[in-house]
């Protein structure tokens, strides 16, 4: 199965290094609900107060190194998707966050994010030639290539929807 080419565009929301899962969604917020539609109002509230209210559908998180470090809680991915953020581009990811992103259909790209400005319009192109990020000024940043199966999972909306389309899960 070959994943279809993808083209995404959105506004860059720039963060720094070592954004941990408790910054993404504070642990105290998960006591009442794990519903991403409830939790999205608290996205990054301890790191960037007011961030959740400023998110626009289609925004792209741009981070430094070690994004998603800390605990392996899946809700740190589902809340990002629930907020309408379509991709995270970082210099590196914590392994468990990247795997949770893949399993939940969130596009997680590794690329050199230095030089991407807050609010800058980004275009992400995924095709047989690789993954590229086009910045407003025309610069291109190559992201690490994604395995075909990761693209297929993303296209399906995550691991469970993918397994359903394959008749392997009812």
Image (cartoon, helix red, strand yellow):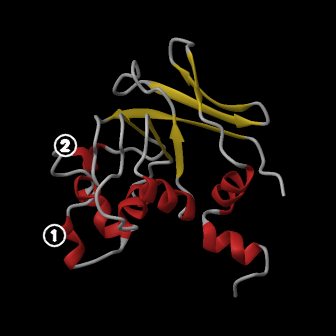
In the image, is residue 87 above or below residue 39? above
Which residue: 69% across, 69% down?
162
Q: Quadrant of residue 168?
A: bottom right
Q: Position of residue 39 (x, y in %)?
A: 29, 65
Examine the rendered structure and indicate whether residue 37 appears above or below residue 107: below
Q: Nearer the viewer, residue 49 or 146?
A: 146
**Helix, strand or loop at disc 1?**
helix
Residue behind mark 2:
48
Q: Is residue 165 above or below residue 149?
A: below
Measuring from the top left, give residue 117's x and y in whole percent: 36, 22
Residue sitting farthest toward the bottom: 170
Element on which disc 2 rests? loop
Look at 55% across and 14% down and name the residue there. Answer: 139
Left or right of 161 in this view: 49: left
- Numbered mark located on residue 28 in the image: 1
- What residue lies at 43% left-to-right and 59% top-to-bottom? 96
Q: Is residue 126 left or right of residue 140?
A: right
Q: Position of residue 106 (x, y in %)?
A: 52, 54
Quadrant of the rendering where the N terminus is positioned = bottom right
Instruction: Give the residue drawn at x 29%, y 37%.
Output: 17
Lateral position of residue 81 relative to residue 50, left or right = right
Give the percent coordinates (x, y) of residue 76. Answer: 35, 61
């Amino acid at each position: 199965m070959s994943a279809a080419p993808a083209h995404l565009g959105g506004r860059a929301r720039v963060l720094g290094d070592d954004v941990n899962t408790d910054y993404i969604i504070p642990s105290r917020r998960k006591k009442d609900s794990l519903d991403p539609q409830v939790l999205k109002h608290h996205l990054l509230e301890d790191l960037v107060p007011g961030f959740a209210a400023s998110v626009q559908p289609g925004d792209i998180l741009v981070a430094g190194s070690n994004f998603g470090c800390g605990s392996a809680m899946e809700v740190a991915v589902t809340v990002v998707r629930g907020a309408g953020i379509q991709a995270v581009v970082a210099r590196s990811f914590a392994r468990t966050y990247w795997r949770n992103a893949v399993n939940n259909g969130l596009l997680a790209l590794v690329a050199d994010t230095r030089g991407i400005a807050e609010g800058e319009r980004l275009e992400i192109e995924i095709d047989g030639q690789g993954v590229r990020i086009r910045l407003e000024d025309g610069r291109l940043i190559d992201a690490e290539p994604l395995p075909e199966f990761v693209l297929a999972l993303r296209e399906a909306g995550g691991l469970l929807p993918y397994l359903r389309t394959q008749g392997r899960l009812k």
